[in-house]
Image (tube, rainbow, N blue to C red):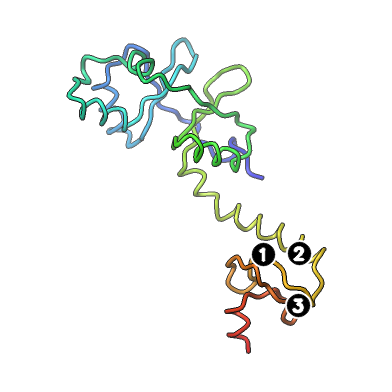
């Protein structure tokens, strides 16, 4: 399976803890990114996102008056990171569970080495789907008898079905079987 290190962005925009939120808003806009990582003495401490800036403005707070680390601590959310060796499927599940769109990538020494977002995962998702499809097909081929009805991906349309039937050596869903007839 694909690892975080294979798809993460290695250029991460960072800010110091005392950077004001107005400056961060400009950095996010100028770099066309959704997140910066707060770093102090090479140690990542938290993140600031475009959503944080929007929240500040929506609550009538002046971003010029608020510092990155102070705002991060005020939000009182855990700083979730991932390892470069983590499987991206596991990271995708973690994103769904936490509702976060990106995670800083931290090596075993605590050093920031990259960032991974839903974009990077989506880029490789066709590859993941293909791998899962091949694994499922191999499992089906090894276990299923041609006279059985099985669950899996149709070999014609690639849609999941609980009623695949073997037709001339290919597992087909009901719709594809009707097209062949």
Q: Which residue is mark 2?
A: 140
The x and y percentages for residue 78 are 47, 22
The x and y percentages for residue 1 are 67, 45
10 Å crowding of disc 1: few (<14), some (14-19), many (20+): many
Marks 2,3: beta carbons within 8 A: no
Pointer 2 or 3: first along the chain: 2
Q: Which residue is mark 3?
A: 169
Quadrant location of residue 108?
top right
The x and y percentages for residue 156 are 62, 74
Pointer 1 or 2: first along the chain: 2
10 Å crowding of disc 2: few (<14), some (14-19), many (20+): some
Q: CA distance from mark 1 to mark 3?
A: 15 Å
The x and y percentages for residue 137 are 72, 63
Q: Say which of 75 and 67 sits in front.
A: 75
* Residue at x 70%, y 73% (from the top left corner): 171
In this image, 62 relative to 177: left or right? left
In this image, 60 relative to 129: left or right? left
Label 1: element kind: strand
Q: CA distance from mark 1 to mark 2?
A: 8 Å
Q: Which residue is mark 1?
A: 152
* Residue at x 59%, y 35% (from the top left corner): 5
Quadrant location of residue 176?
bottom right
- Looking at the image, is 65 positioned above or below residue 2? above
Marks 1,2: beta carbons within 8 A: yes
């Amino acid at each position: 399976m694909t690892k975080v290190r294979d798809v993460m962005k290695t250029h991460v925009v960072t800010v110091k803890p005392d950077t004001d939120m107005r400056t961060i808003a400009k950095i996010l806009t100028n770099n066309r990114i959704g997140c910066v990582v707060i770093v102090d003495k090479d140690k990542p401490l938290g993140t600031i996102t475009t959503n944080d800036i929007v929240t500040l403005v929506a609550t009538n707070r002046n971003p010029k008056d608020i510092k990155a680390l102070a705002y991060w601590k005020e939000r009182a959310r855990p700083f979730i990171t991932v390892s470069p060796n983590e499987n991206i499927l596991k990271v995708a599940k973690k994103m769904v569970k936490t509702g976060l769109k990106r995670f800083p990538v931290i090596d075993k020494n605590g050093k920031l080495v990259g960032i991974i977002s839903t974009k990077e995962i989506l880029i490789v998702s066709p590859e993941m789907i293909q791998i899962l499809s091949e694994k499922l097909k191999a499992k089906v081929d090894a276990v299923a008898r041609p006279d059985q009805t099985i669950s899996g991906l149709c070999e014609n349309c690639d849609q999941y079905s609980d009623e695949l039937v073997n037709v001339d050596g290919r597992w087909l869903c009901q719709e594809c079987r009707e097209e062949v007839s």
